[in-house]
Image (spheres, rainbow, N blue to C red):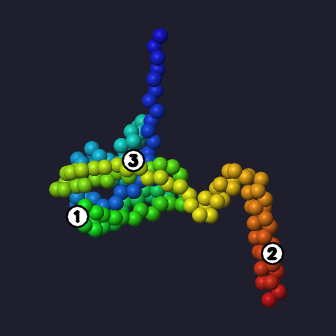
């Protein structure tokens, strides 16, 4: 009996940031980008969508996620501290899903990848966001009362402000 196996299409990355010491066009040949999928367009295109209009789909996805801050290209943001030490800052969007992400680091010299490494990064909420998330999921009744109280206070405060404004 024949069996049908369907390969689940891979999705584009939810968050992707590429940082470099100089403009990527100056240091990264297209052939190297094709192999390692370093730039945003190549990383998204490399996901292998099965649509006929793969270019239009990829471009629309990149445009939307870039506007949301989910795709970033940060050229010139990597600072070399010493020969083997570097640093950069990547702004994580507020709506980034918690979980494990991976950082891929490439060392390029004369347009070729000399070395690469990959390291996991654990992303989780902190501070008041973490407390609200925990209360909402572990004590939903208390969270409901807290939001009701906040709504009452906000409504009363707006009413008083409006009443004060009308008296003038």
* Secondary structure found at label 3: helix
* Residue 50, disc: none
* Secondary structure found at label 1: loop
Q: Nearer the viewer, residue 59 or 158?
A: 158
- Which of the marked residues, 3 or 1, is nearer the chain's N terminus? 3
Residue 111 in percent (x, y) is at 19, 54
Q: What's the distance in space between the residues labelled 1 and 2, CA to CA?
A: 62 Å
Residue found at x 62% / y 64%: 128
- Which of the marked residues, 1 or 2, is nearer the chain's N terminus? 1
Q: Which residue is mark 2?
A: 159
Q: Are marks 2 and 3 in contact (CB under 8 Å)?
A: no
> Which dot, 1 or 2, sits closer to the camera?
1
Residue found at x 73% / y 57%: 143
Total labels: the figure holds 3
Residue 4 in percent (x, y) is at 46, 20
Q: Which residue is mark 3?
A: 44
* Residue 83, disc: 1
């Amino acid at each position: 009996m024949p069996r049908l196996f369907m390969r689940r299409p891979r999705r584009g990355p939810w968050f992707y940031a590429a940082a470099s010491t100089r403009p990527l066009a100056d240091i990264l040949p297209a052939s190297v980008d094709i192999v390692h999928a370093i730039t945003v367009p190549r990383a998204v295109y490399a996901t292998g969508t099965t649509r006929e209009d793969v270019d239009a789909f990829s471009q629309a996805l990149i445009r939307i996620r870039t506007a949301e801050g989910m795709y970033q290209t940060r050229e010139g943001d990597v600072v070399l501290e010493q020969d083997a030490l570097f640093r950069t800052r990547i702004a994580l969007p507020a709506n980034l899903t918690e979980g494990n992400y991976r950082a891929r680091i490439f060392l390029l010299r004369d347009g070729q990848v000399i070395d690469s490494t990959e390291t996991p990064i654990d992303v989780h909420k902190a501070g008041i966001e973490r407390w609200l998330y925990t209360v909402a999921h572990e004590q939903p009744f208390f969270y409901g009362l807290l939001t009701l109280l906040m709504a009452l206070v906000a409504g009363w405060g707006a009413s008083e402000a409006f009443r004060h404004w009308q008296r003038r």
